[in-house]
Image (cartoon, rainbow, N blue to C red):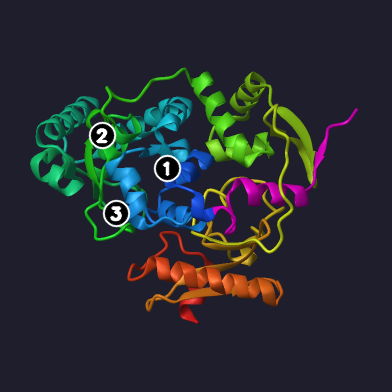
Amino acid sequence: MGLARVTDEHRRRLLVDRHLLGGRGRADRTVSEVAGAFALMHSTDPSTPYLSLHARADVSPLDVDHALYVERSLFRHTTIRRTVFVMPLDVVALAHGAYNGRLVATLRKRLIGWIDASPDTTVAAEAFLRATELAVIELLRTEGPMTGVALAAVVPALQVRFDPMPSATSARPMRITSRVLELLAAEGRIARGRPTGRDFTSASWTWQLTDDWLGTPGLEQMDGGAALAGLLERHLATFGPATVTDLSWWSGLPKGQIRAALDGLRARPVALDGISESGYVLTDDSLDAPADDGVVALLPGLDSTTMGWKQRTWYVDDRPSAGLFDRNGNAGPTIWLDGRVVGTWTQRADGEIAVDLVADIGSDAVAAVEAEAERTADWLGPTRVKWRYPTPRTRRLLDA
């Protein structure tokens, strides 16, 4: 007996339902409910989690701020694929345990090499880095939250310069400040606090001890295999079916580790349209999804839905000619209809939401897109979003 088949059409219905697209149920959802459904929400661009939440729930920027900085029910952390995510507290140990040992080893080795090559240091690089880290930790312990600039003003070692690309034609030395803070954050020793900018687009973070931020003695240290299995279980609940290729790409981990974790979960294989390898779902996944039509959503650049799968032609045209991704594969803002990307959007300097549809979607769907664009413009108000990773299509929209 062959595997049960999940067609592309059915996958799109699952996506609409499990990724909370469209207006159905949006008024009743909370920040925590949406964040819990995704487990990891992209936050390399600080505006992404805010707009991702807005697309799925009738919440304000202040509601998101409250969850992040007052309740602290969400945590911003550097983890899989060296990416910054916002996540519920019960996901932190899973993501950290699954990936951060590998990440920290890479970041530390690279930084030691840069310090060793710097003309500003005369002591052993490893000892220099260790002393610098301790100085940062002690300063945050005694003074509380501080920005990187403020830390560098008190800890002179943070002002050491290095050249990340010494073989390039033009040298561009930079301070080690951001690299040291990234390493300490990846280790779970410090955490990003409230930014100092005027709105949620700011990436001028304050930093503080993770112990102080979470009110617990550091991050829970889980066994890597158990952590990965737990993380994939959370991920597949929303993103299944997904192939080993998808999961390896999404997590940045080798396929062997992914297969071992899927075996531990007893994940169920299913056949997929146009893909030779099996997709995987949780054992008890009924794969039920309502057959809604005319479901429209405007998702921000790097939204977790758009970035959820490597093999994604069933919902988006990811060819360079389509212009929906940048040259490094970062997704721009997208317009969705019934689980498929049908265009892009951006905010112009006057606050207008400009849209660019790549297909004829019919007058009713166009009207729904326009209504969602107006809702987004009203929600943003005076805030101006500038995508960290603009795509060819968003650039053209700004120039039009």
In the drawing, what numbered circle is on residue 171? 3
Cα–Cα span, label 1 and label 2: 16 Å
C-alpha separation, residue under disc 1 versus residue under disc 3: 31 Å
Considering depth in this image, is 327 or 345 the residue closer to the camera?
345
Where residue 22 sits, quadrant-wise, is bottom right
Disc ID at residue 213: 2
Farthest front residue in view: 28
Q: Is residue 35 left or right of residue 110?
A: right
Q: Give the mark nearest the N terminus, 1 or 3.
A: 1
Q: In the displayed orientation, state which residue is furthest to the right.
A: 1
Quarter of the image for residue 221 reads top left
User: Disc 2 residue type?
Assistant: Trp
Identify the residue shown where x is 58% and y is 39%: 249
Residue at numbered disc 1? 85
In the rendered structure, which segment of residues is drawn in magenta? 1-25
Q: Nearer the viewer, mark 1 or mark 3?
A: 1
